[in-house]
Amino acid sequence: MEIISTLIIGAVAGWLGGTIYKGGGLGLLGNIIVGIVGSFVGYFVLGKLGVSLGSGWIGAILTGALGAIIILFLINLIFKKK
């Protein structure tokens, strides 16, 4: 059951991050991957800053979305369209 929760939170966080940061669409699988990896990045960055966006599903989604925005920003820096 936890893996399903992680995939759902990752998909929503990736979608939200992609919606906020107007990069190219990555599709459902891309959103899940960016959201899950973004969760790790978001928790790392917010932990270093001493900030928490809350607990539960909402906090996890917001933290994942923040991390997804960071990842999408870095991807767009590296693979910048000319």
Image: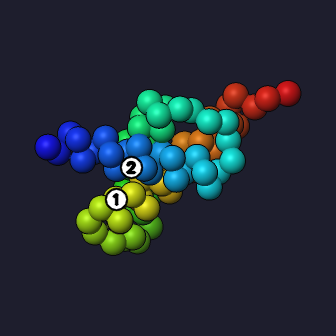
Q: Is residue 32 above or below residue 46?
A: above
Residue 78 has which mark?
none
Q: Position of residue 67 (x, y in %)?
A: 48, 51
Q: Is residue 11 above or below residue 51?
A: above
User: Which residue, given by chain and number where applicable, does mark 1 sit on?
Assistant: 60
* Quadrant in which residue 29 is drawn: top left
Q: CB of mark 1 within 8 Å of CB of mark 2?
A: yes
Residue under the image location 79 percent in, 29 percent down: 81
Q: Is residue 54 above or below residue 27?
A: below
Residue under the image location 41 percent in, 43 percent down: 11
Mark 2 or mark 1, which is nearer the start of the sequence?
A: 2
* Residue farthest right in this picture: 82
Q: Nearer the viewer, residue 34 or 52?
A: 34
Tell me if mark 1 has few (under 14), some (14-19) or many (20+) residues whose alpha carbon lies within 10 angstroms of its own.
Answer: many
Amino acid on which the number 2 mark rests in the picture: Ser
Amino acid on which the number 1 mark rests in the picture: Ala
* Quadrant in which residue 20 is drawn: bottom right
Q: How is the image coloured?
A: rainbow
User: Which residue, given by chain and number where applicable, does mark 2 sit on?
Assistant: 39
Does the rendering let one see residue 82?
yes
Residue under the image location 23 percent in, 41 percent down: 4
Q: Nearer the viewer, residue 54 or 28?
A: 28
Q: Nearer the viewer, residue 70 or 55?
A: 55
Task: Look at the numbered disc 2 and give the secondary structure of its residue.
Answer: helix
Task: Look at the numbered disc 1 and give the secondary structure of its residue.
Answer: helix
Tell me if mark 2 has few (under 14), some (14-19) or many (20+) residues whose alpha carbon lies within 10 angstroms of its own.
Answer: many
